[in-house]
Image (cartoon, rainbow, N blue to C red):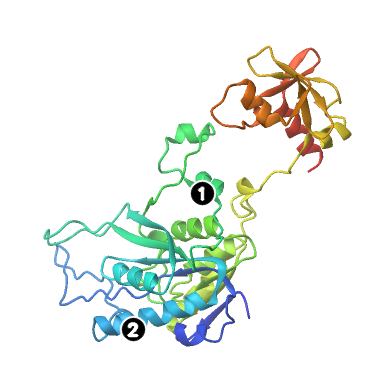
Amino acid sequence: MNKNVILNGDCIEKMKTFPCESVDLIFADPPYWMRVDGVLKRPEGKEFDGCNDEWDNTFLNNDDYIDFTRKWLNECKRVLKQNGSIWVIGGMQCIYTIGGIMQELGFWFINDVIWQKSNPTPNFMGTRLNNSHETLIWATKSKKSKFTFNYKTAKELNTENIDINLFEKGERRQLGSVWRFSVCSGNERLKDENGNKLHSTQKPESLLYRVIAISSKIGDIVLDPFGGTMTTAAMAKKLGRNYICIEQNDKYIKFGKKRVDDIVFEDSDIAHAKFDKKPLKVNLDQMIDANFLNLGERFYLKNSDEFAILKRGSRLEYNNILYDIHSLAAKLKSAKSERLNGFKFWHVMRDNKKILLDDIRSHFREANA
């Protein structure tokens, strides 16, 4: 299957040519079917050019939209790898229909995410609440899917729910399910040859950057069945992922391709999900053999007078009984749990100072990186 391509055509027919379980991540921004009637005008009288494009008004009725949605979602489920995941975005007009069909097809929901728009279009008539968000559904093929989630990378990207001073000092918090980004505007908004807005629902790069960074790995294949202005392809390329985008509109492809061509790979810790790299597994025998620990030396329990003797087999001897460092720490601390992280509770003496075992392990890892 060709990678890093923009395919011109109907997404359902194009996906039918893909092998089963061939893509790692899907981001889908399907037609919303806004069902707009009449002309909406701004307060000063100027016509509002919202989403009233031809591609969003091709459906005869709700059954027609449901049939279309079921067909493209069926193909997405077929081509998605067992441990891949899919994101679908939509407004209130379509997201409930899409979500219901996804559940009928057996998709397993991970999260729904609210994209809160920091600069939403006002409700000009003042007849209802300002529609200031869209919803994303994040799902897998089944409940058993072992999907990619770069949890610590997500924490690194979470700057909207923490004081910036605390963030700069190193504090990190879990990324939640409400994301605040502005609507695509300014230089990021693609224009056509006449300087007019190219696409009504172009998504902000920051949104796709986050989606791809937290739910895929470098080298993964990211599919967008409704390519539009190729925001998905651009951010996939920036993060070192492969992309396949499908789009019917020749004009979108022309400008979108140029956009992607101008993107360069961002060789960053976020792209590599460095924060989620599992550290080298280390046992005490390895550290003894490398002269980071000494067989028979004393291990001192944190905030205690208790100590134990280091033995082979990554064991500590205490009252003539051998224990692992985790269960002995829990026993001597009278913890509710049967095990504590022994690396955080035992010290050794170095130059007449007590050094935490976890620090010794860190030095070992650095030497063996």
Q: In this rendering, is residue 150 above or below 27?
A: above
Residue type indicated by callout 2: Asp
**Residue 186: percent from the left, percent from the top?**
39, 59
Q: In this rendering, is residue 283 above or below 299?
A: below
Residue type indicated by callout 1: Ala
**Residue 74: percent from the left, percent from the top?**
44, 79
Q: How many marks?
A: 2
Q: CA distance from mark 2 to mark 1?
A: 35 Å
| Placement of the C terminus among the 4 image quadrants | top right
**Residue 213: percent from the left, percent from the top?**
54, 56
Residue 113 placement: quadrant: bottom left
| Placement of the N terminus among the 4 image quadrants | bottom right
**Residue 207: percent from the left, percent from the top?**
44, 58
Q: Nearer the viewer, mark 2 or mark 1?
A: 2
Which of the pair 281/68 is nearer the observer? 281
Which dot marks residue 154?
A: 1
Task: From the image, tell me which residue sits under label 2.
Answer: 67
Q: Residue at x 60, y 74 (%)?
A: 4
Q: In this rendering, is residue 255 above or below 364?
A: below
Q: Residue at x 86, y 26 (%)?
A: 295
Task: Provide the secondary structure element on which disc 1 rests.
Answer: helix
Please tell me which of labels 2 and 1 falls first in the chain.
2
Q: In this rendering, is residue 43 above or below 7?
A: above
Residue 242 placement: quadrant: bottom right
Residue 67 placement: quadrant: bottom left
Which dot marks residue 304?
A: none
Task: Provide the secondary structure element on which disc 2 rests.
Answer: helix
Q: Let me know if residue 312 appears in the view.
A: yes
